[in-house]
Image (tube, grey):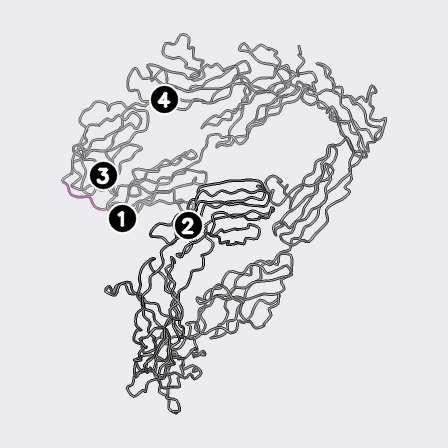
Amino acid sequence: MFSSYNEFLISIPNPTFELLYVSLSYYVLFQGPRWRTEPSDLILPINSPDQEATIRCEAEGNPAPRYRWSLNGTLIDLGGDYRRHMSGGNLIINRLDRDQDTGIYQCTAFNTWGSVLSRRGSLQFAYLDNFKAQTTRSAVNVREGQGVVLLCGPPMHSGELIFAWIFNEYPHFVQQDSRRFISQETGSLYIAKVEPSDVGNYTCVVNNSITKGKVLSSPTPLVLRNDGAMGEYEPKIEVHFPETVPAAKGSTVKLECFALGNPVPEISWRRTSGVPFPSKVKMKNSNAVLEISNFQQEDTGTYECMAENSRGKNAARGRISFHAKPHWLQTMIDGALSIEENLFWECKANGKPKPSYSWLKNGNNLITEGRVQIENGALSIAALNLSDAGMYQCVAENKHGIIYSSAELMVLASPPSFSKNPLKALLKARSGTEVALECKPQASPRAISLWKKGNDILVCYSSHRISLYPNGTLKIANVTRRDAGSYTCIAKNQFGTASTTGKLLITEPTRITQRPTNMEIIVGESIVLPCQITSDPALDVSFSWAFNGQLIDFHGDIDHFDRVGGSVTGDLMIRNIQLNHGGKYVCVINTDVETLSASAILVVKGPPGPPDAVAVEEITDSTAQLSWSPGRDNGSPITGYIIQARTPFTVGWQAVDTVPEVINGNTLTATVVGLNAWVEYEFRVVARNGVGVGEPSPASAKTRTEDAMPDTAPTDVGGGGGTKSELVITWEPVPEELQNGEGFGYIIAFRPLGAVTWTRAVISTPGVAQYIFRNDTIPPFSPFHVKVGAYNNRGEGPFSSIATVFSAEEGNGSQWDQTFFYCGGATLNSNDEISWFGCPPPPSRLHQLLGYEVVYWEDDTKPDTVGKVRISGNYSAVNVTGLKANTQYYLAVCAFNTAGTGPQSTPINATTKKPPPSQPPLNVEWTLIGSLLTLHWDPVAAMETEAEVIGYLVLLRRHRYNDINNIVTNKTTMELTLSPDDNYLIQIKALSEGGEGVGSEPIHIQKLSMGARGSGASRFSPWSLTHFPAVLIGALVVLSPSW
């Protein structure tokens, strides 16, 4: 009956409801039928004889379920029914017949595990018959002002109808308003007060919303009587709702109310309870229809319709009651119970009226009998046996609907098995602890267990340390090494016996030999938190670390955290510690038998965090009172604050003076002093503590200081020069940040030397730095006392110190002597440089000499080639650059002062040198034997337009000392002694009167290449070190002024 695997005997009703017995593995799979799709209500139009209907039904299970159908409680025999057949579980009906096919359908799904019933689904047919005999309807005679009702009398039908009326002929439909109303309950047309325009023929139009069919009644003539109009009368309600209106939960309820009367009555609604209508209640058709959407329990009550005109009023009342189909609050779930256990299932449903309950097993009603007890929604079966297995359904029903809940019951029977829960082959326990050996066989019914140590049966009363529990668990308290050994659990029930064996090993306690300690550390430092143990060699040990309750991911944060040490060490290294690393660190040691931990608090100290909420409380022209709130101290108390300021005129932030001068860590206000008036400032605060200076606070709002009179005078007052009869006064303008307010300008005061009275002038432009006073009476080069002050809209500021300034000189009419003497030479080389040497001129008698101007040109007939070089001071030589090579130039010299330039000297001419050779030294060969380097290269031949070669320059650069040696030779070979422990770079250039030529290709000598040789063709290299000194030819110029 049983295999080597744990199996169960399960009772399965087959289609003939006989009992079969099969075995299944322990992991139970409920495979009875379960609904995927159940029948739903259908209402279909009958449009043609070939139309078909499909009522859906689908279930899942293993084996695949089969199906049967019933109509109005009677099983449908599909074998002899040519119009009905099944596709899967779906019932398909062809050639629909309203009389035969209308009713309630229910599907049953079944397989070898049991049967379940589906919910019920109705099939109805929508139709609309024609009106009976289409004879002419009798005319309706009314008086003007009288109310009238035109009856529709709809024909036989099924499905929702929609009514309308045609006036005289199509498509002139009656439009509803406060005087005319079409009831969608009766179809009749109500006219509250007939007017002459109402006379005509009225036809009732009936539409079926399902079939979309439409039929028309015979016309009803409305005739106006000629015996006069009818007088006014009070309202008479002709359309009103029933006294009791049942309404389903969630439905839309419509109440109709319309009255006849003269004048036309007005309709209003209210709840007799006085509760106002919620927003979902709508009034339609001139208040003749009250619509309540999504009807709920709180919408129940008595509703009143009031019709009122000037002659009186009338009312109709009715109560709307609430009803709801059952819906589940609690259902049962599939169950697998052992044989002889007790079953208890309970289901609960809500609805109005309150639903009643019944129970089904495999589609058949269950009744209270013997072991089976049913009480409302509760089912209990005592002492289960294999025949109790199957599909069960709880049924909840009231007059508005019925619902089903299904579950499968498996009854299990199996011998004990430890295949899923054997004892561990080796169980380790620490000496002195309690050990629990669990005996959890899979067995139905529950097995009886006993224990053996070795070959001896354990009896719980043989030792006060040993306990055997009803669930089979063996507990040994305060274990010692004597408790080590082999333990066997033996389980038995009426279907068989099984056992499982494991070995118990007792180990010595693990001890922490070095644990982490609380520490304080500075940001950026690194530390190691120790965690070291001694443990039993039989134990497997692992270390982990937690930071503030979260395990540290050593792979995810390798920049800061690392494990160091061996197998018995769990030391934690934290590198480059940051403020967020402060907190609680816990070292966790896990072994096979226990878990130990050691913790430490790490306090990380850093510079303070940025202060906040910096505000300017009060500001004057030179001070600002600030307040701020402190930032985080980051583990070290704040010892002081520094205030910094920024203006549009400063480069970045700068520290400012404050009162108090030193701001301690407990002070959160200070006054900044020494500010400039009328300047826009921003302030920020920086905190410091014992670790350092922290990040600055956010900047305060920009605030401008008050304006004030200028307190800074212009500087560098001077002047002089200009043209005849002018006094030129200059000064350094006052910077904008020192102008102290708007309307800034300068006051210039001057007087001749020895005079008492000052002459004043005002300049209103702040950026001006010069004032020129013109007067023909001013003698040339005459001394004046001058001073410059500042002013703005607030008043005048201080004046500068008094300076002496000379008025303009007369023009320089002195002549230079025309004779030139050579006291030196002029050198014109490939660098386009001309050095001119002249003798100092005689001192000026009336004028102040400012310098010399050298004028040069290529051709005396081409003035566009003129160039100038001006040199200030009493010099006698100047270098002129940017000249062409191998070109003749003319040069002349003149002096200049503040009044202009004097006459030029007699020109001289000179020719610049040819350019150096453009070809580098070629075929450079070198040999290095030991430390001796021998170089050889081909001679360089200059072209006709180039200066002749007069020698060669060897450039030797040592890498270690980064120095360069220049060696000149007139040969094409050279021997050099090199140091063996350095690298060298060597280059060769041709020398000429025009300067250095193009260098050869650099030679790289490495310190490991001693005893090598090489050669290479030369190419142009931009590597250039220095120029060969030029040969100078001087010319002496004797300056002979004529004054």
Q: Which residue is denoted by mark 2 in the rendering?
A: 998
- Left/right placement of residue 296 relative to residue 268 reads right
Tell me, yes or no, whether the highlighted magenta stretch contains residue 134: no
Q: Which residue is denoted by mark 4 in the rendering?
A: 124
* Secondary structure of the residue carrying numbered label 3: loop
Expressed as whole percent of the image width and height from the top left, the position of residue 498 reads: 73, 17
Q: Which residue is denoted by mark 3 in the rendering?
A: 175
Say how many tags the image has.
4
- Whether the residues at callouts 1 and 2 have beta carbons within 8 Å, the answer is no
Expressed as whole percent of the image width and height from the top left, the position of residue 117 reads: 49, 19
Question: How far apart, in angstroms, are the residues tagged by discs 3 and 2?
Answer: 110 Å
* Amino acid type, residue under disc 4 in the picture: Gln
- Mark 2 crowd level (few <14, some 14–19, many ≥20, 10 Å Cα): many
Q: Which residue is denoted by mark 1 in the rendering?
A: 311
- Whether the residues at callouts 2 and 4 have beta carbons within 8 Å, the answer is no
- State the residue at coordinates (54%, 9%): 16
In the rendered image, the quadrant that contains the C terminus is bottom left
Q: Earlier in the sequence, mark 3 or mark 2?
A: 3
SS assignment for the magenta stretch, majority: loop
* Amino acid type, residue under disc 1 in the picture: Arg
Question: How far apart, in angstroms, are the residues tagged by discs 1 and 3?
Answer: 26 Å
- Left/right placement of residue 913 relative to residue 163 reads right
Question: How far apart, in angstroms, are the residues tagged by discs 3 and 4?
Answer: 33 Å
Q: Which residues are magenta?
A: 227-231
